[in-house]
Amino acid sequence: RIYHQYRYWRKTGKWQKLMKIVTANYDSEWLFIDGSVVKAHQHSSGAASHLDEAIGKSVAGNSSKLHLVVDACGNPIHIELTGGQVHDAKMAKTLIDSTINNQTKAVIADRGYDSSDIRECIFKHCAESVIPVKSNSKSCNDTLDWYLYRCRHLVENAFARLKHFRGIATRYDKLKDSYAAAVMLACVFIWLPLI
């Protein structure tokens, strides 16, 4: 009975609505984006599906990648799921466009997001991109705000808090939507003491 109610709420979008309500007043001055690989349990990746269930092959075997946006206080505000082999930069525009607003002053990310397209996307929203250039780049990091970049540990801490939940640290769900709903529920638990 509980699983059927959980599935019904997933299908009707109640978990997304709940996360939107809980995260409505996030501190959007700084946004931190990053991705983390989550191993998929063998039972979650066994069934064939004609849909994209966000389970991909990577070096460690079957895995999913959890892409996360965190606000200036280190609280998760938006998630996206892809296969484990998908590069972080491919989801950057989706993450930025879904969370950035006119109060956002900076978007902070690691070297994996070093791309002119991503920087243009951030600049289009009138925000600063705090993304260091890759070591093989011809440009330099002279204008980078290193103080803001050092605060990037907030997104890593958010992943650590999410992965305290056993069902998030290892993916046991076959369906992408079920796993995404579990991640949203974990995000709501992180937000609850703040409301």
Image (cartoon, grey):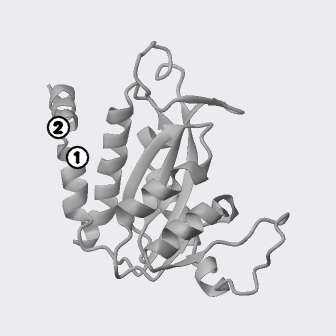
Please say whether residue 161 is visible from this viewpoint. no
Position of residue 59 relative to residue 151, above or below, is above
Instruction: Kindly identify which numbered label has been placed on residue 55.
Output: none
Instruction: Kindly identify which numbered label has been placed on residue 9.
Output: 2
Q: Are marks 1 and 2 in contact (CB under 8 Å)?
A: yes
Label 1 to label 2, Cα distance in Å?
A: 7 Å
Check disc 1 and report the residue beneath it. Answer: 15
- Expressed as whole percent of the image width and height from the top left, the position of residue 80 reads 42, 48
**Callout 1: 10 Å neighbours few (<14), some, many (20+)?**
many
- Tell me which residue sits at (63%, 79%) in the image: 150
- Tell me which residue sits at (25%, 56%) in the image: 19
Please say whether residue 102 is visible from this viewpoint. yes
Hey, what amino acid is under mark 2? Trp
Q: Is residue 47 left or right of residue 42?
A: left
Q: Is residue 166 left or right of residue 85?
A: left
- Tell me which residue sits at (44%, 63%) in the image: 96
Image quadrant assignment for residue 181: top left
Position of residue 76 relative to residue 172, above or below, is below
Residue sitting nearer the eye, 41 or 66: 66
- Expressed as whole percent of the image width and height from the top left, the position of residue 115 reads 65, 62
Q: Quadrant of the N terminus?
A: top left
Hey, what amino acid is under mark 1? Trp
Q: Is residue 22 left or right of residue 33?
A: left
- Tell me which residue sits at (44%, 71%) in the image: 74
Image quadrant assignment for residue 135: bottom right
Residue sitting nearer the eye, 8 or 145: 145
